[in-house]
Image (cartoon, rainbow, N blue to C red):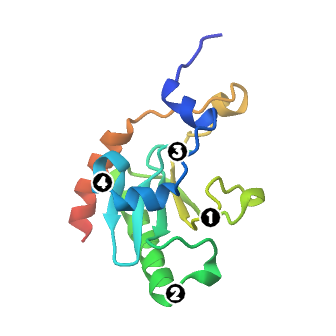
Amino acid sequence: MENLWAPWRAKYILGAKEKECIFCSRLKQKRDRQNLILYRGKNAFIILNRYPYNSGHLMIAPNKHKSNLDKLTKAEYTEMFRLMILSSKLLNIAMPADGLNIGINIGEVAGSSITDHLHIHVVPRFQGDTNFMPVVGLTKVQSLALLDIYDSLKKHLKKLQ
């Protein structure tokens, strides 16, 4: 058996959690490419997942720190839904994805690892992206570098606006 090394995931696996909400802290900074923020809206934003299920995994979150759907204003949920549609168009053009998984995990038992800041996952899926590696080898192979994906998505996003 061969080893597939992914040392960049060590912080995540070993539980090096940030003290502040990752979404809130990234929004305060003005380093969008480094923080993988693709789009900033009036009420919500799009960010690439640093620990993706699949290459191109996007998340849409409200700009304000809110933990549940019933806490969103109409302006926030309207913009989040609009950005979800924009994200799906973007992934279909830039990647291009064969399909998408779109979902919201509310609470830790529902699968959320960031429980206190609501977010929507938009995960591109590709024909054959499920194979023996995650099933037998318990390893997910990411074929594309995050900043390469960011640059490609950013370029295509400008065309869609």
Q: Residue furthest front?
A: 19
The residue singled out by tag 1 in the image is: 116
Whether residue 135 is visible to the viewer of this picture, yes or no, is: yes
From the viewer's perspective, tell me whether residue 136 is left or right of residue 119. Answer: right
- Amino acid identity at mark 4: Asp
Q: Residue at x 57, y 73 (%)?
A: 66
The residue singled out by tag 3 in the image is: 52
Q: Position of residue 1 (x, y in %)?
A: 66, 10
Per the rendering, the mark at residue 73 is 2
Whether residue 131 is visible to the viewer of this picture, yes or no, is: no
Question: Which-is-in-front pick, marks 4 and 3?
Answer: 4
| Dot 2 or dot 1, earlier in sequence | 2
Q: Position of residue 103 (x, y in %)?
A: 61, 64
The residue singled out by tag 4 in the image is: 32
Disc 3 and disc 2 in contact, CB within 8 angstroms: no
| Dot 1 or dot 3, earlier in sequence | 3
Q: Residue at x 43, y 48 (%)?
A: 56
Q: Position of residue 116 (x, y in %)?
A: 62, 64
Q: Residue at x 58, y 44 (%)?
A: 17
- Amino acid identity at mark 2: Thr
Question: For the C terminus, which image quadrant?
Answer: bottom left
- Amino acid identity at mark 3: Pro
